[in-house]
Image (cartoon, helix red, strand yellow):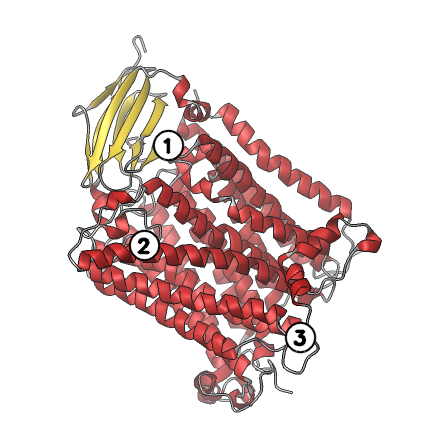
Amino acid sequence: MSFKNTFLNGADGKFKPDTLTQMQKIVLRFVVVGLVFYGFALIEGMIMRIYEIEPIPFINTNQFFAILTAHPLVGIFGSTYALVFGAFLFLTPYLMKKPLYSVKYANRSLILLTLGTFLFWFAGFVSHYAPLYTLYWPLPADFTQFSVWGGTFFIVGIAIVMLGTVFFIINIFKTIVYTPKGWEKQPAAALFGSAIGYTGLKNTLAKKENKKEHLVPLPVAAIARGTVDMVLNTVIILFTGVLILVFMVGHILGFDLKETAIDALLYKNWFWWGLDLIADGLVLIFVAGTWYLLATMISGKKLFMQNIARAALLLELVVSWTVWSHHLLSDQSQPAILKVVSGELVTAFELITQGLAFFITLATLWAARPLKMTNPLKFLLGGLLGFALAVPAGIMQADVGLNRILHNTQWIVGPHVHVAVLVGLTMTLYAAVYILFPVVTNGAKLYSQKLANIHFWGHLIGGIGMGAFMGMAGLKGMLRRTLYVDGEFNVYMILAALAGTLLLISFLAFFINIVMSVGLKGVIGIFTRSKLDTKELLAE
Amino acid sequence: MVDSNLVLWGQTIAYTFYCIVIILLMAWFGYKITKSGKSNKVSAGLFYSFVLFLTVLGVSLHIITYNTIPWTPVDLNRGDYTPDKTFEITVANHEFTLPDEKLLIDCDDLVLFDVTSKDLTYGFGVFRQDNSMVFQMQVVPGHRNDILWKFEKPGIYTIRSTEYSGPRGIFMILKDAVEVLPCEGS
């Protein structure tokens, strides 16, 4: 096939959007949205990398901090949430062997997520609203620095994303427990118990003859448990958004409400409790579930230590509710007992829960030797390595003594955050994308294995390299969330920018590969209405 | 004497060593998994030993740091110590206000920095001439923010906000604001 023909019709013309069900199209739309916003976050990241070396003339400082504010939120909500929503809205019914509860809700999630992300990004871009994702009180209501209108639209955008999340949550739980039309009545309570890990916990403690069958596959149990954390953090983010909006609306109407009415430390505890339900909660649980799914799909074997894995997911859920205080180890008014128990010891438990998931995944793969080094397998190994590097870095900074000299340095955001998100989480998601690609496209052919290899090595080396150089700067005292205008840390920042460029190249390789695989007509076809009148996931 | 530079040096060595080991381990695993082997079974004993190892590692890290990093027990039990000198510092409208133009500290003094914010959340960090950090803490409005510190080396240090407080916060730097005097006879 000529290049032009492949560009228009996809590799070997194998992708036929007309053969896709409604659900396949929704999943692919989520993927497209997720990748577009990943591109946003990547370009923003590169702008910041360059700015940390030398300020860019047409971007002023306020714009830089607006980018710094939008960057993680676009990455988390616009990209990761989109990819996760798409994958899990497909996998939950796929593994439960029944239709999704509501296609309408899935569409609403997609539209609200896309609109909300674009709105808060655009509000920040235009108005330079930049209280950072941390929103430490009373910064989000500091109207001497920020536009109240910009802030209002920014917060409304976040609230719209949360509304989309609510539809996702309802859809996931309903899909697990509901009885499809014409089916025999499903045991909703037992299904729910299995999904949240109650059965797994009972089986771990029970004698062999009393062990009960798991009604819900393990990856679905992980999805359900991560979604429990999503319920809680959605409530908290919505509540926080409404609180900030009250101050904004008051200001617009000419009433300046008293900022000190809200206790800044209590707010910080509340906020981090909610945010850690994402960072130390659902992300880790979803990732563990995805590892288990990938390991069983790649190996064709049963998961090693399945009951322990289920019980560990439940334990991780409890850990995620009690772990937040490691963000407040440098807050001197935070009670010492919270610093030690929640901040240090509970956080150290993540070493165990994540280490356990790491071991179980590797042991499951090992049982199937020899395996072919496919794209899903190599990206899965990359994801495992990412967390193996990032989790211990996090445990180190979650120490009262070390936090005194690491807090808010580039160490936190480099070896811990970026390696966890870019290498650990994103490579796991890419593994899922590569393994599900033939399923959701009805067997479309990947255009180029060479581009897939560039994607893998560029992402792995770029992600680890960027995190490492940021970490080295952090150990030398470089702070995050600020600017160094005299080139104090330029050696590290130039190296980090070069590593970031590798990430950009690898993403371009992936993007071109996907577009050439499905073709331009295929991309357009994803967004047209499905001609198949079925609620089933795949065409008969 | 143990100062923050030495602690960071130790951390760098330990973490770099760990990174090399885990990367090599994953590379080895990636290679071996494509080959046939004698036994594909992983024993439950190995699994439980690994979990036990992680438990010991997670807890012992904090025990070790508590007993080797000098400021950790001081920080957690600040009420039990009497400072040799106290500096009361206020922050408002993105500016630090110090009790003196330069904070002079005698050799071996245990110093209390008591920082109050009148508006936003800020950070309070002390840095060496080479920009490396000596220590930092958060400065939260409406709460007491105090830290006890004993400087291990004489020298001139810079104060800088270590928390984002809006774009204006990047200028919150007081160069050479702290001077620790050398010990007599040294």
Q: Mark 3 lies on which chain?
A: A
C-alpha distance separating marks 1 and 3: 52 Å
| Residue A363 seen in the figure | no
Looking at the rendered structure, the kind of residue marked 2 is Leu
Q: Mark 2 lies on which chain?
A: A
Locate residue A463 relative to residue B51 in the image: left or right. Answer: left
| Residue designated by label 1 | A332
| Residue designated by label 3 | A97
Q: Quadrant of residue A489?
A: top left
Q: In which quarter of the image is the N terminus of chain B?
A: top left
Looking at the rendered structure, the kind of residue marked 1 is Gln
- Horizontal and vertical percent for residue A355? 62, 47
Q: Is mark 3 on a helix, strand or loop?
A: loop
Q: Quadrant of the C terminus of chain B?
A: top left
Disc number lying in front (2 or 3) = 2
Disc number lying in front (1 or 2) = 2
Q: Earlier in the sequence, mark 2 or mark 3?
A: 3
**Tag 1–tag 2 contact (CB < 8 Å):** no
**Tag 1–tag 3 contact (CB < 8 Å):** no
Residues at marks 1 and 2, common chain? yes
| In the foreground, B9 or A429 | A429
Q: In which quarter of the image is residue A537?
A: bottom right
Q: Which of marks 1 and 2 is nearer the N terminus?
A: 2
Circle 2 crowding by C-alpha within 10 Å: few under 14, some 14–19, many from 20? few
| Residue designated by label 2 | A243
Q: What residue lies at 62% left-to-right and 64% top-to-bottom?
A: A220
Q: Mark 1 lies on which chain?
A: A
Q: Check the image and report above or below for A329 versus A29.
A: above
